[in-house]
Image (tube, rainbow, N blue to C red):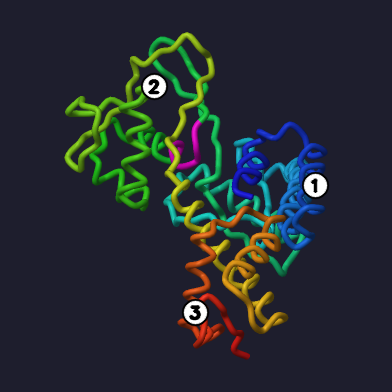
Amino acid sequence: RKKLARRLLFDKSANDEHERSILTKLKQQCGGQFTSKMEGMVTDLTVARDHQTKFEEFISTHPELNPGIDLAVTVLTTGFWPTYKSFDINLPAEMVRCVEVFKEFYQTRTKHRKLTWIYSLGICHITAKFEAKTIELIVTTYQAALLLLFNGADKLSYSEIVTQLNLSDDDVVRLLHSLSCAKYKILTKEPSNRSISPNDVFEFNSKFTDKMRRIKIPLPPVDEKKKVVEDVDKDRRYAIDASIVRIMKSRKVLGHQTLVMECVEQLGRMFKPDFKAIKKRIEDLITRDYLERDKENPNVYRYLA
């Protein structure tokens, strides 16, 4: 679901039809409940494109509201998508104007929905004027907000940047590292080493140049893999618990080996459960008084209604 979200939001998907055909296969394998949110995500994108067309029409009929920046907004339904952190970043005035104009447009479409802006998923195209030539930078909204601070100041200290952006230290370190220590050094820093510290001072690197006219400056992602694995393990624990209880409820008394094999067979359509994990879940259900061991034979379990 998270990978699908990234493909859809960052326009990395081959096409909607491919996504829908995969979802159809998943639906046949795992049931409608499993894919309903993902189907909602694909539909959301279609609706969002319509919103965008209507927004562009709204701007053309109200030229006085034109923020002077090309703006594309993807409106998503909260329930379908993975949860994303939304921070109250202090946006530059130009971006605040864009947000206000879109809010005004959205009010004309519906009065009953509240917009929560997820700036961490945004992308900006910025025109940067260097001494050698002008280059278009493709950056995240956070990186753009940081770079635009240098329109009003030649030099900024780390603490000034943190205060003006209103972001956590971890986020600011990632942003500054991507702009001053990585491949494209849009900012120069004092002292000029490869780590960011609270005493650093940053300056716009007017001497920067590149053979390309347009460059994308990546922001290293936060490592979510560990969290995803933990979440999957948690979901699987619940699935194993439910399977054991279902089997024991219908059979009342069952030997360990038979219970494990039936559990594997039931869950095989969704994932291949580990025998050790099943044993652990049985022990846990015994401590929670769902099952008990037979007094005569400890390898036999009884269901406690």
Kindly check if marks 3 and 1 are in contact, taking CB atoms under 8 A apart as contact: no
Tell whether position 143 is magenta. Answer: yes
Residue 27 in the image, given as x and y percentages of width and height = 79, 53
Mark 1: which secondary structure? helix
Q: Residue furthest front?
A: 296
The kind of residue on which mark 2 rests is Tyr
Relative side of 22 to 175, left or right: right
Identify which residue, 28 or 241, lies in the foreground.
241
Three-letter amino acid code at the position of disc 3: Pro
Q: Residue at x 49, y 52 (%)?
A: 229
Q: Which residue is mark 3?
A: 298
**Mark positioned earlier in the residue sequence (3 or 2):** 2
Residue span colored magenta:
139-144
**Can residue 58 be seen from the camera position used here?**
no
User: Which residue reaches farthest bottom?
Assistant: 305
Residue type at mark 1 is Lys
Is 161 included in the stretch rendered in magenta?
no
Residue placed under numbered mark 2 in the picture: 184
